[in-house]
């Protein structure tokens, strides 16, 4: 074994430049493959982060203004959803949905105060089921419950940034904060996994409507369906739209009056895009590796040609064709294996460094996670790529090895 290695080193040393350039092309190929795979994963992680706080099979329904005159009503009419709209959707689509929640926003200036502290935050009235559609992590206390809704309780839950702003280091549970002068008791604190800086407050939908003159209006409806395919979710989306169009006397051709975001459709589309990116990455990476393998094959052919006399002498003193093949293949595998290993380590190391830097940046800027986060290549994939690379090195060296094994001693000495 040591003799083989010494012989390989001696041969490659005589052709140092060719060996280095060939090894570099192989190392660069696997380095780029690992880097591209990691970058694709980073983009995919960013996409999944955008869906982290939302049910992946939900329909978000909101109202707009009509664009088409219909049934004696002018264009430009504002559609206003009501609690009755939500109740009808719950009845009509009972078999198609898991959870439903109306949502009422407090637009404009609603000052939130606690003692001498105050701030303007995003305030919404919701139902208990909203927690299963717009996902949050409860830090302490509880979420809005059905008794809050039924008894019109002045309960409120606040996000951690709001807690830090109003209460500093003080325990918030059981304390009262005022929303436009109306006291609400803090019953829980939460964190938005999608945006840790989110300054949000949730209160019971019924209380919000009664206290802030919302009557029976809702601004938005959130529906978590039980659909498992885009086609199923699309069917439910179309039927919900048609129901609301009929109830609010909207033209069937008016696609702008009612807005619906189908999260499952968006999620699957994003997955499809990243599947295409992964395929593109593999094609580019493999083509780069193939270019390196072709380089290995070429240098082996050149080495065999330059060592014709040496191989002839080896065969003259008893070397078998198999030993000649083994020698040439060993050199080929050595170049591809060593270069591939360095390319693999360099690629994984660079991805680890980028990931560590992004994690530090993401502490201060959540937008980093939304676009590109934790780029990493699967180690198993990387090892498989290295194994394929070494196998390709064997194949690349086989043709020149066969040619070397077929050299006749007398012809080799005569040519010299």
Image: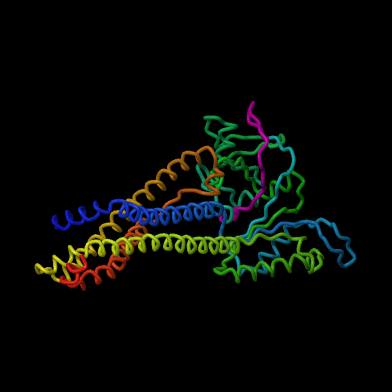
* Residue at 19% in and 71% down: 411
**Which of the 4 image quarters holds residue 298?**
bottom left
Residue 229: % across, % down = 56, 69
Q: Quadrant of the N terminus?
A: bottom left
**Which of the 4 image quarters holds residue 77?**
bottom right
In the rendered image of this protein, does residue 285 appear above or below residue 122?
Answer: below
Q: Quadrant of the C terminus?
A: bottom left
In the rendered image of this protein, does residue 154 appear above or below residue 251?
Answer: above
What colour scheme does the image use? Answer: rainbow
Which region is colored magenta? 112-132
The residue lying furthest to the top in this view is 116
Residue 71: % across, % down = 87, 67
Q: Of residues 298 and 187, which is closer to you in this image?
A: 298
In the rendered image of this protein, does residue 97 appear above or below residue 82?
Answer: below
66 lies left or right of 301: right
Q: Of residues 379 and 19, which is closer to you in this image?
A: 19
On whether residue 113 falls in the magenta region, the answer is yes
* Residue at 40% in and 61% down: 291
């Amino acid at each position: 074994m040591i003799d083989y290695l010494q012989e390989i080193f001696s041969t490659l040393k005589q052709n140092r430049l060719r060996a280095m350039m060939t090894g570099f092309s192989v190392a660069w190929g696997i380095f780029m493959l690992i880097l591209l795979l990691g970058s694709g994963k980073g983009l995919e992680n960013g996409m999944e982060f955008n869906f982290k706080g939302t049910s992946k099979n939900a329909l978000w329904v909101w109202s707009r203004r009509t664009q088409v005159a219909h049934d004696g009503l002018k264009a430009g009419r504002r559609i206003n959803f009501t609690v009755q709209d939500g109740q009808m959707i719950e009845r009509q689509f009972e078999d198609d949905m898991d959870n439903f929640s109306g949502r009422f926003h407090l637009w404009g200036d609603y000052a939130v105060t606690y003692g001498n502290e105050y701030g303007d935050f995003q305030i919404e009235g919701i139902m208990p089921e909203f927690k299963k559609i717009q996902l949050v992590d409860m830090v302490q206390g509880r979420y809005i419950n059905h008794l809050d809704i039924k008894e019109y309780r002045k309960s409120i839950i606040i996000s951690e940034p709001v807690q830090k702003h109003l209460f500093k280091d003080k325990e918030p549970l059981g304390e009262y904060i005022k929303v436009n002068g109306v006291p609400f008791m803090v019953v829980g604190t939460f964190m938005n996994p999608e945006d840790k800086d989110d300054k949000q407050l949730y209160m019971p939908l019924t209380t919000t409507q009664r206290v802030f003159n919302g009557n029976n209006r809702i601004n938005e409806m959130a529906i978590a369906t039980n659909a498992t395919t885009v086609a199923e979710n699309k069917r439910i989306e179309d039927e919900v739209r048609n129901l609301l169009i009929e109830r609010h006397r909207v033209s069937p051709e008016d696609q702008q009056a009612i807005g619906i975001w189908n999260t499952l459709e968006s999620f699957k589309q994003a997955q499809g895009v990243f599947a295409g990116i992964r395929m593109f990455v593999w094609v580019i990476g493999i083509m780069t590796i193939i270019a390196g393998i072709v380089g290995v094959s070429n240098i082996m052919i050149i080495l065999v040609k330059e060592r014709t006399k040496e191989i002839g002498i080896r065969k003259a003193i008893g070397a078998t064709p198999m030993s000649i093949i083994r020698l040439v293949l060993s050199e080929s595998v050595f170049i591809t294996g060593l270069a591939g290993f360095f390319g693999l380590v360099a690629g994984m190391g660079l991805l680890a460094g980028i990931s560590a830097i992004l994690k530090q940046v993401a502490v201060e800027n959540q937008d980093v996670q939304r676009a590109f986060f934790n780029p990493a290549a699967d180690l198993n994939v990387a090892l498989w790529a290295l194994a394929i690379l070494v196998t390709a090195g064997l194949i690349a060296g086989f043709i020149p090895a066969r040619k070397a094994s077929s050299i006749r001693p007398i012809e080799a000495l005569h040519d010299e």
